[in-house]
Image (cartoon, grey):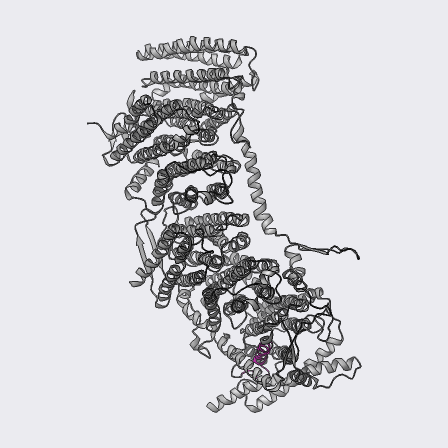
Amino acid sequence: MIHAYQVVVVAPYVAALVLLVIPGYRLGAITNVVASALTFAAGLWLVVSERVVSDYAIVDEFNIVFIAINTLVGFTTALFSASYIGHEIETGRLTPTLLRFYHAMFQAMMGSMNLALIANNIGLMWVGLELATLITVVMVGLYRTPQAIEAAWKYFILASVGISLAFFGTILIYLAGQPALGEGVPAMTWNLLQAAASRMDPAILDLAFIFLLIGYGTKVGLAPLHAWLPDAHAEGPTPISAVLSGLLLNVALYALLRFKMVVAGQPAALDPGPIMIVMGLVSLIFAAFMLYQRRDIKRLFAYSSIEHMGLMVFAFGMGGPLANFAGLLHMTMHSLTKSGIFFAVGHIAQAKGSQRIADIKGLSVTHPRLAVAFALAVFAISGLPPFGVFTSEFLILTTTFAREPWLALLPAFGLLIGFGALLMRLQDTIFGEPVGPAHRVDASSVPLVLHLLLVLTAGIYLPPVLVAWFQRAAELLG
Amino acid sequence: MNHAYEISHLLAGVMLVTSFALLYQQRVAAVLNTFAAQSIALALAVAWAAWSQDRPDLFITALIALTLKGIVIPVALHRTVARLGIHREVEKVVGVGVALMVGLALTGLAQALLFKVTHGTASHAREELALALSIILMGFLMMIVRRNAVTQIVGFMSMENGLILAATGARGMPLVVEVSVAFSVLIALFVFAVFVFRIRERFDTIDIEALDRMRGDRR
Amino acid sequence: MTGDLVVQFLAQGAQMFMVLLIAPLAVGVVRRVKARLMRRQGAPLLQGYRDLAKLLRKESVVAENASWLFRSAPSLIFALTWVAAALVPSFASGLMFNWAADVVALVALLGAARALLALAGMDVGTSFGGIGSSREMMIATLAEPAMMLIVLTLAIAAGTTRLAGVADFFIAEPLAVRVSLALSLVALIIVALAENARIPVDNPVTHLELTMVHEAMILEYSGRHLALIEAASYLKLVLYLSLLICLFAPFGMAPANAGVGGWAIGLLAWSAKLLAGAALLGVWEVSIAKMRVFRLPDFVGIAFVFGFLAILLAFLTRGALE
Amino acid sequence: MPELYVSGAALGALAVAAAVATLVRGPALAFVYPLTALAAMALGIVDLRVLLGGGELTVWLPIGLPDIGLHLRLDALSAFFGIVINGGVLAASVYGMGFDRAKELTPRVEPLFPLFAATMNLVLIADDAYAFLFSWELMSLASWALVVARHTDPESRRAGYLYLIMAAIGTSALLFSFGGLAGPAGGYGFDTIRAHPPGPLVAALVLAAALVGCGSKGGLIPLHAWLPLAHPAAPSHVSALMSGVMTKVAIYGFVRIAFDLLGPPAWWWALPPIVLGAVTAVLGLLYAVFDRDLKRVLAYSTIENVGVIFVALGLALAFRANGQEGAAAVAMAAALLHVLNHSWFKSLLFLGAGAVLHATGRRDLEGLGGLIHRMPRTAAFFLVGALAISALPPLNGFVSEWLLFQAVIAAPALPQAALHFASPAIGAMLALAAALAAACFVRVYGIAFLGRPRSIEAARAHEVPMVQQIAMGGLALLCIAGGLFGSVLAAMIAPVLRDLVGSVLPNSGSGPTAFSLIAFDPERSIYDAPVIAFFVAIASLTTLLVVHRLSARRTRLGPAWDCGFPDPSPATQYTASSFAQPLRRVYGAVVFAARETVVMPPPGDARPAQFSVVLIDYAWRVLYAAPSRAVVRLSERLNALQFLSIRRYLVLMFAALVILLSIAVVTI
């Protein structure tokens, strides 16, 4: 009897192998969609089937949401990419061989991320996360333009250093857990570590958390460890940007939070809260200012991802049931919205044949529907109602003000600065007299609409079961 | 079996010394030799751990360390260096003296951090851990105080030596072997990447400064 | 009872017609006094009545592009001013509709008349009208804050904004908060000069473009329209004079329940005081020169300052009383 | 409870209208306005029933925030503001019915119009912080989209940008104030908040945040700069909504927070609203008096009225804090009635401006003139609005103005020195504002409607469609009726006053006539509009009669007096700028450092003389231009971090690591 979580992890890898041998990119694209649909189905099955805690796999209230999101966005992205990537062949940016490679890597990446999410073993999670990272490195360099290769190289070096530091942190966690849990696998198992946290050596925990914060923080894209993120988003294929912002950052943050749970279990250890608050605020405000000078629309939204990651880290740093709840909600909403935005950006790039903001004007005249969808997506990410991001930002800011009135000014300041830049760019792109070419967009708009609908629903109504999961996870996060 | 610790500490100490030597070296060739020495020391340390903790699988790690990092990569890099004709002085960002001072400070920091560790198995392993940590930090330092790609790769590899050391020092830690393999692959990719860029002649030198001339988003 | 009501009503009506009746005479007095002080023969005292009658008889010339507003403004302006003037307690404080005479409302009624006049001035579209209207409104913005301060002082002193109430209060205790009252008296006089377009704010007899204010606004009017506007300005003068009287020299005013006899006395006293005030105005006007338009802020500013001082002093004295 | 279903249906209808309008195109869009009008009427009737019938409607839905849900509540206060809102919406939609189906309907406006109306209603009935801010921000968003409807015009893009940014700032301020009210436990329901009023320090922060949040939406100086740009940029019937109605939503927010949620006030809470309000009142009109764009003048005068309302609210706070409920009732009545009145005459004026824009295609006063001949009805209605907004009796503007002056006159009785020494200054500033308002609107009306046309368009102007005249006429009628029967309105808002300040105005039965408006007690102050109007009517009738009898009836039409220059061109008339000149000399030099420069060519030189005026807007310079420049400069500085070499990025990483490690060393 195989269990859903096994399917969720294994299916993509199998699909990857299959895709490696399938000739013809259309067939490959279809296979990719089918495989992702399968994984998504398995994810849903996982949601409804009972929770799992085995030596190597864990599925609890905390990660179930992220598995669901992961498989869902994986599916929608595959859908988008299937209708999008053909265009790349026509424009000659990709060869069929590369495209076959692309599809295989896509599945492998999804599988690795699912592995990282489901792993009950900190070593296994590390492996999964690093695998996903290295694959994305290759994907970023896919176009083989100088810029793409440079972005990939930068990503590669920074990520490798991050990997090493994270691994050292992992070793330290093992060392901390070893006395309590004995040698071997148990000392690397999430649920046991969490349970035994109070009996661990605080000093080692602190050291471990710092290394993990820097190591995984590099993947979360916290300033000043963010340098790889904008270029990687800008130079890679758009579907990959969507997956990067929507999923990989989340998975990295998920890892960080797991470790925070462990550290939170040991009162004697250094409180990670202030550190996370500072790093979060730095990323938030820094990214907000960086938005103003952007000329590449994908890089623009990459920086906005940094901004929102900063806000989440800030929220988790604040801690407490309300802020943690808001942080988790924000993670979910951000990954849905941001991947949706990248879908829209892909459409725009096809419509105008360029991703330079200067070349994009008057969309609301040439492509009214696309313009409306894009505007809605941007408003959603800016935390305006009726979208879910508004809910999370509402909770974060209000509860912060209620607890630390003066501290609340900083995130609000950052968000306002960021909103100023995004709104400016939005108005530049959708308003005014259209310039340049206005091609027909053949990429499917279903994924974008789907994501917008989900975010909209969340802004108006949060299903109680979701709320229950989040609240449970929030109290674990301390 | 107290001497087990002493021997492993001895080997770790040797590695630390080699790290300092790496910071000190002026010429690429010498850097590579020193690194080879460090890797061999690592191999010995791992082998010793494998024997003393009787975990035969660690011998694989030792073997990898010895062959790949002790011999193959240094030789390969020697070739490259010769081919690229950059075996003269390595351009440094800060002087050797400063680098060594910073290295000392980092070592002190590492000691101070692990001094707090009080109980559990960790406390036995803590000196070794401290040494590993300082090796890692100094590898990182080497990556940022040297300007050319080969020395940076070496820096990264000595960082990773420190990691393997720490991993083996942690008694009974699973996956060490797999991870060491993974890291070797990573390094292979590193070296490979440099070669690739060289072969495709996208970048006429492998000085990393040149690798990122065309940072995106210019006007 | 009903008879009493009728009498009351008649008394109110009487006040209404008294002000109308006496207005031209008051103006005549002013002019006569000025003339005499200038060693001129001067027009007879009743000249004002003659002027009105003459204007009413003349045909009125209206510019082609004048609108209905231009034609209907005069009667409205006249009516508003008349009502305002009739609301100020003159010879008796407790008349039937005395409660309707709220200071704030009174000022506002005059404001409405002024706005209409300014609009009428701009209707034909000559630059004269523009000059007059713009300057008139500017002067109003200077005068109204001062007026508000005066009202505030009185309200603090008397605890009401009903003119009759204020008058009663001053009849009852004529020595109340004297200093601040003196100050606000000066302020009110200055405001009155500004509002009535008298020297030094404006010269009612000039027709020199650069200095005209009120005359410029009504330059296009003639015949019966002009008559109404002139009458309105006469009434305004009477209004301010009797306002000054009822606030600062209420003695002789008949109390609420005084019969016809009391009213007669009050009437005599009031007319005497009114004409005396007119004469004083004449004296003042010959003894001072017209100011340049943009010196006015300084002049009316004095009223503002005095009004403010008056209130502060009122606070202090009240604090002393408490 | 039928009201519940009616209002639900009406709101639903608005939503449906918005949704459907996004799908249809062209003339079909015209259905929006009748539907919106009906919905607004229904909502208004419900509000009226609740206000008069007492009681309240409450709804709870399991959506919105988890564990809290969506609370909706229609109490007396919401109902009163609901009447204001829906009255404005009704007028605007009736006006919209007059649009030319072929030319004047665009998918950029019609779908958002009902949405805008619905969101404003939602803000009023929201009974928890989330619902409130949700609909508040949605309202901003809808109005933003309406502002940028003419998107090809860079000016309106700029206006929209500034507007939405300021709206976001205001919303975050309100987020803070509700966060303070809800407390760390997150009790976002208003009933929870009422149950646990915050401590003094938090209360102060909440009040400050609320003042920023609502002030920025209402245009309180110095948060006003967006308003004169955004309100005129929208289509005129939307400008009417934004200026006449949406600013009232902002005021509602402040009243709800300061009088209802925040618990018993401290006396010094009154100072910020009073001071800011008074400054806003005067400065707003000075801006207006010097501006030459018809719609922008109206927007600036909106700023002034908001200031006046805030002064009244501040006084009400002060009186209430000192337990003087009677005076508090007077001040509050002044505020609420001014809200109502302003919504009427400002909507009327904006619709009139829209009519002028439609008829002539121009907004600049210098190009208008003589419209009273070409569009007589519009001119008449606009005149009513202009006189009403100048607070002249017997129109409605004066009723609230009178009550406000009564409140100011009562202020010296307050024990706190700060307040009673401030009262004369407040009174003087309000009087100045009133006089300036009169000057401003005499100028607007005299230049735009009177005199001779200053442009071909003005000379060729035509009257607007009947429906639009009906919309304006209805509002004009309301202005007159509200002026005559202000006492009735005051009686209507009694429940609101009782809820907010615990006292009401003495009912007019205790006065001499049935319609006399009484402040404090009949012995103290009475304003009886009907009686005064009756006197004026009698007087003017008698006058007309007498003049008709006595005078020569002959009237001769002749050319205007031209000083001997035959047929002077319309350019010789007084212009808007020249009308403003005396005021500019007196006030402009002080407030805006106004400088006039005249270049006279020497005799014999054919070049025209040049006259130019420079006004400096310090508020803009300091609070808007400087910060935006700072943001850009800082972003340019930071942008260097996008272009570092990999090694430098590694240095950053290393530094972060070492710093954290050192922190660990020192802290553990």
Question: Residue C19: horizontal and vertical position, in percent?
Answer: 61, 83
Q: Main secondary structure of the magenta part?
A: helix
Question: Residue B191: horizontal and vertical position, in percent?
Answer: 45, 15
Q: Is residue A287 left or right of residue C91?
A: left
Q: Is residue C81 magenta?
A: yes
The answer to whether residue D522 is above or below residue D25 is: below
Which residue ends up furthest to the left in the rendered image? A1
Q: Nearer the viewer, residue C193 or A421?
A: A421
Q: Nearer the viewer, residue D603 or C249?
A: D603
Question: Residue B136: horizontal and vertical position, in percent?
Answer: 44, 19
Q: Is residue C147 left or right of residue D605?
A: left
Q: Is residue A17 left or right of residue B158?
A: left
The answer to whether residue A329 is above or below residue C131 is: above
Image quarter in which the C terminus of chain D is found:
top left
Image quarter in which the N terminus of chain D is found:
bottom left
Stretch of the chain drawn in magenta: C74-94
The reply to whether residue D155 is in sight is: yes
Quarter of image, res A217 = top left
Quarter of image, res D364 = bottom right
The answer to whether residue D252 is above or below residue D566 is: above
The number of discs equals 0
Question: Residue A456: horizontal and vertical position, in percent?
Answer: 36, 45
The reply to whether residue D416 is in sight is: no
Q: Is residue B83 magenta?
A: no
